[in-house]
Amino acid sequence: MASATEDPVLERYFKGHKAAITSVDFSPNGKQLATASWDTFLMVWSFKPQARAYRYVGHKDVVTSVQFSPHGNLLASASRDRTVRLWIPDKKGKSSEFRAHTAPVRSVDFSADGQLLATASEDKSIKVWNMFRQRFLYSLYRHTHWVRCAKFSPDGRLIVSCSEDKTIKIWDTTNKQCVNNFSDSVGFANFVDFNPNGTYIASAGSDHTVKIWDIRVNKLLQHYQVHSGGVNCISFHPSGNYLITAASDGTLKILDLLEGRLIYTLQGHTGPVFTVSFSKGGELFTSGGADAQVLLWKTNFDELPCKTLNKRNLKRLHFDSPPHLLDIYPRTPHPHEGKIETVEINPKLEVIDLQSSTPPVVDIFSFTSTTTTENNGRMMPDKSEEICGYFLNPSLMSPECSPKTMTKKTEDMSDLPSESQRSIPLAVTDALEHIMEQLSVLTQTVSILEQRLTLTEDKLKDCLENQQKLFNVIQQKS
């Protein structure tokens, strides 16, 4: 464990993408890193020396978001090509494509149990998908502009979303209703997320601010103005005591939330920083931006095992529980006038092990059709795969296909055994693909009808309100 006096350090950087990095995420076991980019590719990097990097080819436009499932056996991605894809993070390149959004998709987020996936889109909707059945569940419509981000609460009961309509909305996943609304008159939030115990949310503002709201008392707790450009992304340390921010001013900043102050400014990127993420245990964090570089940093914060953190936070997920000492309540008003000096770190990219920082890249081409269930075209899995299913949630699997075997598969992609495969008759495959395409069109049609129905409801509501006003005016005159 790093000493308390040691500052965060840049450990290494990864080069392989050809354009800006839009999203980064650590695998649950902390041995891999997934990145998404404007170059239309996903990449998975291994932290092992001399290990290959894998580039996943399939999206037809900018990849905007990427995330590992909680068990690490799936990788979800969102793209401007209006699709969401689920990938098996191995060297086969199998993927499943979801087509229900009618505009670019901005974010993906798994629920903590891995059973649901939330996607946010420029079609003004949030959609929720069932991962076990590989099907669309429902849409959330109330935003009036592009939705930039949607995240599940740690217990999965809520979803928080932010939009260019300058609102942050909180949704109840049980009754599918918007239960809370935070609005801003200045800018909109680019990114929003729950803290690890689910009692408050933080937003990254286009107006250069970071705001922290308590969702139990609907109160703005802290308001940071530490960046000189729009804030693009935030990430909570698993302890909930620190928040790291990435902004268009080219810096990362680390905030001490208990003391309510800026403690570190990190300079390593050239140009805007678009994404940042802590590892699941909090000992590392990674960042990416317009310079197409992925930087890996080591922290000096308290390192706690993931299981310990999850157990501690699960005890405090209920709104009726009294505030805990670790919950954020500012001790002072926090004007952030720079009275307390902050540490500025500029590593100038002096990192060790440059050879493994630019590993050989292997292109993985996906075998998929437009579908809402996994369809590998010409191949079928072997017997053990038939039992488990590539896209099943490990927590719902049979004992002979436990998450441990899945973890072994994803830990080291270069050591994967080859699998026996049986071909399907070509005519059957073509027929199945045609059916899947028709189902996809049907799904999109339902999605559009959903939107139109919502708009009709809104217009009808306005008409009724106007009629009531006219009626009241007539009554007053008479």
Image (cartoon, grey):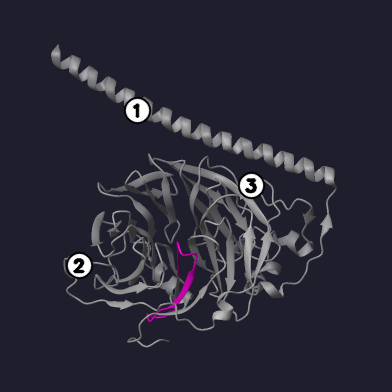
- Secondary structure, mark 3, is loop
Q: Is residue 58 magenta?
A: no
| Image vertical order of residue 227 relative to residue 161, above or below | below
Q: Amino acid at mark 2?
A: His
Does 5 sit left or right of 19 as displayed? left
For marks 3 and 2, give the CA distance.
Answer: 49 Å
Residue 269: % across, % down: 41, 69
| Residue stretch in magenta | 287-304
On the image, which quarter does residue 218 sit in? bottom left
Regarding residue 61, the answer to whether it shows in the image is: yes
Q: Which residue is the site of mark 3?
A: 372
Q: Amino acid at mark 1?
A: Lys
Residue 362: % across, % down: 67, 67
60 or 165, nearer to the observer: 60
Residue 333: % across, % down: 16, 65
Question: Which quarter of the rendered picture does the C terminus lie within?
Answer: top left
Q: Which residue is the site of mark 1?
A: 461
Residue 415: % across, % down: 71, 75
Q: Which residue is at 24% across, 73% downward?
A: 259
- Secondary structure, mark 1, is helix
The mark nearer the N terminus, 3 or 1, is: 3
- Which label number is shown at residue 336? 2
Q: Amino acid at mark 3?
A: Thr
Question: Which quarter of the rendered picture does the N terminus lie within?
Answer: bottom left
Q: Cβ–Cβ below 8 Å for labels 3 and 1?
A: no
Which one is closest to the eye, mark 1 or mark 2?
2
72 or 250, nearer to the observer: 250
